Amino acid sequence: MRVLSLLGAAALALPVASLAQPGERAAGRRLATEMCGECHQVRPNIPVLYQYPPSFQDIARLPSTTRLSLNVFLRSNHKNMPNFIIAKPDADNIIEYILSLKRQ
């Protein structure tokens, strides 16, 4: 019983920053528009002039689109994309925005 109490106390002592925290959707939409909007259709319900690269709405609809997959994607080099270096808080915000499109 004492071991469980110690484990519980240790868990409460962890810094808040170490806990997974989602980003902010509005900030993510603004960042996505600024950084990705030249090539991708970032906002939903806007007529698409071309099909490639996929819109953020199409990316959000993929069954494989998860917080983890987007984290990996945003931290990897891509052949047909500029190699942006996105700060973790900015990436979290963009991810939150894309995941919000999945829920629409």
Image (cartoon, rainbow, N blue to C red):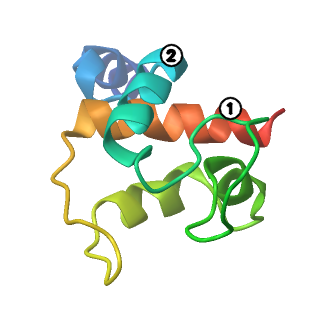
Q: Residues within 10 Å of mark 1 (few under 14, many from 20)?
A: some
Q: Earlier in the sequence, mark 1 or mark 2?
A: 2
Q: Amino acid at mark 2?
A: Ala
- Write the residue at 20% across / 56% down: 84
Residue 59, quarter of picture: bottom right
Q: Which quarter of the rendered picture does the C terminus lie within?
A: top right
Q: How many marks?
A: 2
Above/below status of 8 relative to 43: above
Q: Secondary structure at mark 2?
A: helix
Q: Is residue 39 visible?
A: yes
**Residue at which label 2 appears:** 26
Q: Is residue 22 visible?
A: no
Q: Camera-side residue: 14 or 65?
A: 65
Distance from the alpha carbon under mark 1 to that under mark 2: 10 Å
- Write the residue at 35% across / 79% down: 80
Image coords of residue 97 (percent x, y): 56, 32
- Write the residue at 19% across / 65% down: 83
Q: Secondary structure at mark 1?
A: helix
Discs 1, 2 touching: Cβ within 8 Å: no
Image coords of residue 54 (percent x, y): 62, 64
Determine whether, in the image, residue 63 is placed left or right of residue 54.
right
Image coords of residue 87 (percent x, y): 18, 39
Determine whether, in the image, residue 56 is placed left or right of residue 74.
right
**Residue at which label 1 appears:** 100
Above/below status of 18 relative to 26: below
Q: Amino acid at mark 1?
A: Ser
- Write the residue at 15% across / 53% down: 85
Q: Residues within 10 Å of mark 2 (few under 14, many from 20)?
A: few
Image coords of residue 88 (percent x, y): 24, 39
Residue 64, quarter of picture: bottom right
* Residue farthest along the bottom direction in this orientation: 79
